[in-house]
Image: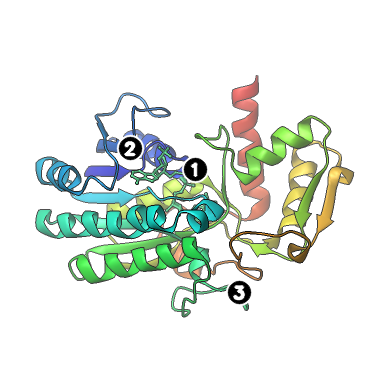
């Protein structure tokens, strides 16, 4: 399969490139600036706002599948700079989708549980989105761009949530930040009233690769199989890594003034994904076990 991975310097994108290469697909990787976390892959340095060059790259490489892992992911940053969020998360996605239609490419577009308001999760694939905040609104509009502009049944939307992995790619993720902080014996405050579907980046990448290989259409929840509050996640991580669980201090979302609203009772139902894909969404214990293995491999 000829695949174009967009956002290949990111946490998910970098793992996906490695996973597709491991499966011996022909991969072209696109990212901003020079390649930082992936090697031995043809690299196109592009910002998604460069619509003409993005379109030309797709015209020339004619990928059978385009997997878009690029996004402005800093939730509060999106609130501060909505125009920048719109350019990356909506206009960039529209550019990719239009070019995919012309080139005959299937699109797998990575989205988020933030398209839901978090009032009554976990949410299944057919639940009605109700995004709050600029990041959420822009990701929801990105989903709409894919659905409107790609050819019928030639797109998949793959929603994920709280992605973590070791090593971090670029900025710290929830899991790597916890390990960094707890390993120094420092305390962390975690929300006891926010429920999420923690997702190991490698597991997400494997499910995206499965979706791409089968060119499965529609909406998919490619995240971990367990829905837990953040304190439970932290305590289970302590158990697995041998950190002192007393370092976890429960707090509530209302205690912190967040620039952008966060879904409280979120989480995604993964039944459809578990039925269709070879790589299953991992339950939390298994996911943390593999995270610990990743950590040990790099640290020893
Ligand atoms: N991480 C999570 O907890 C989480 C949760 C739910 C959903 N998701 C979704 O999962 C996908 C992958 O996220 P991730 O965790 O891998 O995030 P990430 O590590 O922040 O990677 C995103 C990548 O997108 C690139 N990018 C941003 N704006 C761009 C632009 N205008 N043009 C080209 N590239 C651009 C970034 O480039 P630079 O490296 O140059 O900044 C970065 O490499 C995203 O769609 C995100 O919305 C993530």
Q: In this rendered view, identify the residue nearer to me: 282 or 62.
A: 62
Q: Is residue 74 above or below residue 22?
A: below
| Element carrying mark 1 | helix
Q: Is residue 265 left or right of residue 76?
A: right
The residue lying at 85 percent from left, 51 percent from top is 249
**Label 2 CA crowd tier, 10 Å (few <14, some 14–19, many 20+):** many
Percent position of residue 94, x then y: 25, 60
Q: Earlier in the sequence, mark 2 or mark 1?
A: 2
* Rendering coords of residue 137 (x, y %): 44, 67
Q: Position of residue 46 (x, y in %)?
A: 27, 38
For label 2, the SS is: strand
Measured from the top left, where is residue 83 in percent x and y? 38, 57
Q: Residue at x 33, y 39 (%)?
A: 20
Assess mark 2: CB under 8 A from ligand 1? yes
**Residue for badge 3:** 121
Residue under numbered circle 1: 202
Cα distance between the residues tagged 3 and 1: 24 Å
Q: Name which of mark 3 and mark 1 comes first in the sequence.
A: 3
């Amino acid at each position: 399969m000829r695949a174009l991975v967009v956002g290949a310097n990111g946490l998910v994108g970098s793992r996906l490139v490695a996973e597709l290469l491991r499966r011996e697909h022909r991969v072209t990787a696109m990212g901003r600036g020079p390649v930082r976390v992936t090697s031995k892959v043809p690299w196109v340095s592009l910002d998604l706002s460069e619509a003409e060059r993005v379109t030309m790259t797709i015209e020339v490489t004619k990928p059978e599948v385009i997997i878009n892992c690029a996004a402005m992911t800093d939730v509060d940053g999106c609130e501060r700079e909505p125009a920048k969020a719109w350019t990356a998360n909506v206009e960039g996605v529209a550019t990719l989708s239009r070019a995919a239609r012309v080139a005959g490419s299937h699109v797998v577009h990575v989205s988020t549980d933030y398209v839901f308001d978090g009032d009554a999760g976990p949410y299944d694939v057919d639940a009605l989105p109700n995004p709050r905040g600029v990041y959420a609104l822009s990701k929801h509009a990105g989903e709409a761009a894919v659905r409107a502009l790609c050819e019928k049944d030639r797109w998949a939307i793959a929603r994920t949530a709280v992605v973590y992995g070791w090593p971090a790619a670029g900025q710290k993720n929830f899991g790597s930040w916890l390990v960094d902080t707890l390993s120094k014996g420092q305390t962390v405050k975690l929300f006891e009233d926010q429920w999420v579907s923690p997702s190991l980046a490698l597991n997400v990448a494997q499910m995206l690769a499965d979706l791409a290989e089968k060119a499965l259409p529609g909406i998919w929840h490619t995240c971990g199989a367990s829905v837990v509050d953040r304190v439970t996640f932290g305590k289970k991580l302590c158990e697995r890594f041998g950190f002192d669980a007393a370092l976890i201090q429960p707090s509530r979302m209302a205690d912190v003034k967040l620039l952008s609203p966060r879904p409280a009772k979120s989480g995604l139902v993964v039944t459809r994904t578990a039925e269709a894909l070879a790589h299953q969404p991992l339950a939390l214990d298994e996911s943390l076990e593999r995270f610990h293995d990743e950590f040990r491999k790099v640290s020893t």
